[in-house]
Image (spheres, coloured by chain):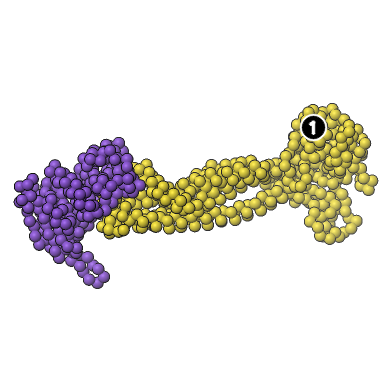
Chain colours: A yellow, B purple
């Protein structure tokens, strides 16, 4: 018999007990569905994590002055020395793996345009900042070197600020007032979209570092060149740990921190933080995979069970087929193909269900839908394999029947 | 010319610790074109005899030759091929596939004989026409009467142009009138040259045959030719 005929015979047999066939498939549907949904949702989530890492800035380290990052009691009072602009320059000069080292200060301020106002975060930046954090301009230009040098009253607006104060349209050349100081907008930043943390990265205004120190964030208790954060972009992601150690060494030297003294700065690997969250997702995924594989095994056992019932029910049919010339191999193939058809159908339904669920989840979470075609083919092949594995014993049992006994059975 | 030749055929079954001698030395020769009835009480060995000459089973000892070829020690795969090509079975309970049309039921042996799809439909249609049911090709068995179902089963037995038709109580599930119809059909087929062997316990059915084999306790006790019947035909 040709494969086409075998499949047709299998479909005929499955149609006889439509509800039973469907219920039997359900285990495979759930198993395959869970696997596909897991992988596809996982791929979407992974792409989202990548996008977030990208939006932070590639290979980004952040150095913060003052306290230790992770709590703990502060000792060595009085030895604290803030980071400075010179620290940033020294890092870049002394560690060749560093692509950009951007000293920044930030504070919040009210921004006024006409009769509109908006409270946002002001960043005092230097030329390295846009590089380190992967900011791209959507309109206008970056600050000129002279503007950095002279502390010019110029500003770059984040996309949220543009929306709140100007709506759509060109903002280059517009005047804004920050803490009553008039600024000229020279450019706007391309939005980074959904943020990593609770804050909106696009809700920001950037001004030259010197301008921010002098006019907006100036604090009498600090030196005029003290900075809150230094963002460091590393050329090679593999050098992240090494560069982190180098930075600590350089800064401890510059700040004259002895071997037994606590650091007055902390270094965070931003990429690692996002990846840590992705790892939590990974654990969830593995849990789902375990559930899926259990479901597949249970589904396979269900198929074996129903195939055994079917073989017993159709003993007479088997006897007749043998009497008219079916060889043992023909009977074996018939039931094997039936089991595989059952599993494949279940697998296909599972794929459809999973893709539907995935599109829904991606819609809600705002992730991209990434259909992993290889996993779909693997799922189909795996369903077939389950059919063969769990269908083999019932099929062999059918083929081993004695035609005389089989014909005599009720 | 001898078509079926059995020589000292024995068949033993082991039931529990006891050995049952279902056939205890049967020798018989049946020629091509004969119409033979096999009679005997239950347990006489007539069913075992049918199973052996139908190539559904192998004898414990002795030889069976079909068409000059020994089938006593063929593999089960080879026996399936012999059944498919040389023998047509008709059963008491028809044994049609319930969800399958009359045409596809008739075509079933062709499926296992490796005949192509369109050729299968053509030959199955021809076989249905031979039993007068070509207008019922697309009916399901449940839509046919008992006599029609048995005729579909006969068409299935004929579709591969076998050398021998083996019928096991073919009228057992039918009323007398329909039974007569079926036996007339067998007679017509026999008249066209087909070897027909019918197992029955009804004398009226057996009377259609020109030769009657009577079984008892695993041996043939009588082998009679019906000369009157011969004259009548």
In the image, taking residue A395 as reference, residue B29 lies left or right, namely: left
Label 1, secondary structure: give it: loop
| Rendered location of residue A236, percent (x, y) | 69, 43
Q: Residue furthest bottom?
A: B17
- Nearest the eye: A85 or A409: A409
Quickly name the residue at label 1.
A167
At x 38% / y 43%, what residue is drawn?
Answer: A8
| Rendered location of residue B97, percent (x, y) | 32, 49
At x 29% / y 57%, what residue is drawn?
Answer: A406
| Rendered location of residue B90, percent (x, y) | 22, 50
At x 18% / y 66%, what residue is drawn?
Answer: B21
In the image, taking residue B44 as reference, residue A331 lies left or right, namely: right
In the image, taking residue A73 as reference, residue A20 lies left or right, namely: left
- Label 1: chain letter: A
* Quadrant (top left/top right/bottom left/bottom right) for the C terminus of chain A: bottom left
Q: Is residue A159 visible?
A: yes
Q: Residue furthest right?
A: A220
Name above or below for residue A166 compared with residue A93. above
| Rendered location of residue A175, percent (x, y) | 87, 30
- Nearest the eye: B176 or A250: B176
- Nearest the eye: A288 or B101: B101
At x 81% / y 45%, what residue is drawn?
Answer: A230
């Amino acid at each position: 018999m040709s494969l086409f005929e075998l499949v047709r015979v299998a479909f005929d047999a499955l149609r006889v007990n439509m509800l039973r066939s469907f219920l039997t498939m359900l285990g495979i549907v759930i198993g395959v569905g869970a696997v596909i949904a897991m992988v596809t949702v996982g791929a979407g989530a992974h792409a989202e994590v990548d996008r977030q890492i990208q939006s932070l800035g590639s290979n980004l380290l952040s150095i913060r002055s003052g306290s230790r990052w992770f709590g703990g009691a502060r000792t060595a009072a009085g030895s604290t020395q803030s980071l400075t602009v010179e620290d940033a320059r020294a890092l870049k000069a002394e560690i060749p793996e560093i692509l950009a080292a951007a000293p920044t200060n930030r504070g919040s301020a009210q921004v006024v345009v006409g009769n509109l106002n908006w409270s946002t975060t002001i960043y005092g930046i230097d030329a390295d900042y846009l590089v380190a954090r992967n900011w791209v301009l959507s309109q206008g230009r970056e600050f000129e070197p002279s503007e950095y040098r002279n502390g010019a009253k110029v500003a770059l607006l984040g996309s949220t600020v543009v929306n709140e104060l100007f709506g759509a349209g060109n903002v280059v050349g517009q005047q804004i007032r920050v803490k009553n100081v008039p600024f000229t907008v020279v450019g706007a930043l391309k939005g980074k979209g959904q943020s990593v943390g609770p804050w909106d990265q696009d809700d920001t205004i950037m001004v030259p570092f010197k301008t921010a120190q002098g006019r907006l964030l100036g604090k009498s208790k600090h030196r005029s060149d003290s900075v809150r954060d230094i963002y460091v972009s590393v050329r090679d992601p593999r050098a992240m740990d090494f560069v982190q150690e180098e930075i600590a060494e350089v800064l401890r030297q510059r700040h004259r921190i002895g071997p037994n003294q606590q650091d007055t700065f902390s270094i965070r690997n931003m990429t690692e933080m996002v990846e840590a969250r992705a790892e939590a997702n990974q654990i969830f995924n593995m849990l789902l995979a375990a559930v899926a594989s259990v479901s597949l095994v249970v589904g396979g056992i269900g198929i074996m069970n129903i195939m055994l019932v079917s073989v017993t029910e159709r003993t007479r049919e088997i006897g007749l087929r043998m009497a008219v010339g079916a060889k043992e191999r023909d009977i074996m193939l018939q039931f094997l193909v039936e089991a595989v058809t059952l599993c494949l159908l279940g697998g296909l339904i599972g794929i459809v269900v999973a893709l539907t669920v995935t599109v829904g989840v991606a819609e809600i979470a705002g992730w991209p839908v990434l259909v992993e075609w290889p996993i779909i083919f693997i799922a189909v092949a795996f369903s077939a394999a389950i059919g063969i594995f769990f269908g083999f014993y019932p099929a062999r049992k059918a083929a081993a029947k004695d035609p005389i006994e089989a014909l005599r059975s009720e | 010319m001898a078509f079926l030749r059995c020589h000292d055929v024995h068949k033993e079954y082991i039931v529990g610790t006891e050995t049952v001698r279902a056939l205890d030395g049967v020798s018989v020769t049946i020629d091509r074109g004969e119409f033979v009835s096999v009679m005997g009480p239950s347990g006489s060995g007539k069913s075992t005899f049918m199973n052996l000459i139908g190539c559904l089973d192998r004898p414990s000892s002795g030889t069976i030759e079909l068409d000059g070829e020994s089938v006593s020690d063929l593999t089960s795969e080879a026996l399936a091929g012999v059944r498919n090509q040389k023998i047509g079975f008709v059963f008491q309970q028809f044994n049609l596939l319930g969800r399958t049309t009359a045409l596809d039921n008739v075509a079933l042996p062709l499926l296992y004989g490796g005949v192509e799809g369109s050729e299968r439909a053509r030959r199955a249609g021809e076989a249905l026409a031979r039993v007068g049911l070509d207008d019922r090709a697309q009916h399901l068995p449940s839509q046919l009467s008992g006599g029609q179902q048995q005729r579909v089963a006969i068409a299935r037995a004929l579709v591969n142009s076998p050398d021998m038709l083996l019928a096991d109580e073919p009228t057992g599930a039918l009323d007398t009138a329909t039974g007569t119809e079926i036996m007339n059909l067998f007679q017509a087929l026999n008249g066209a040259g087909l070897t027909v062997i019918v197992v029955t316990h009804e004398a009226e059915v057996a009377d259609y045959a020109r030769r009657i084999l009577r079984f008892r306790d695993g041996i043939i006790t009588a082998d009679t030719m019906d000369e009157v019947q011969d004259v009548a035909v």
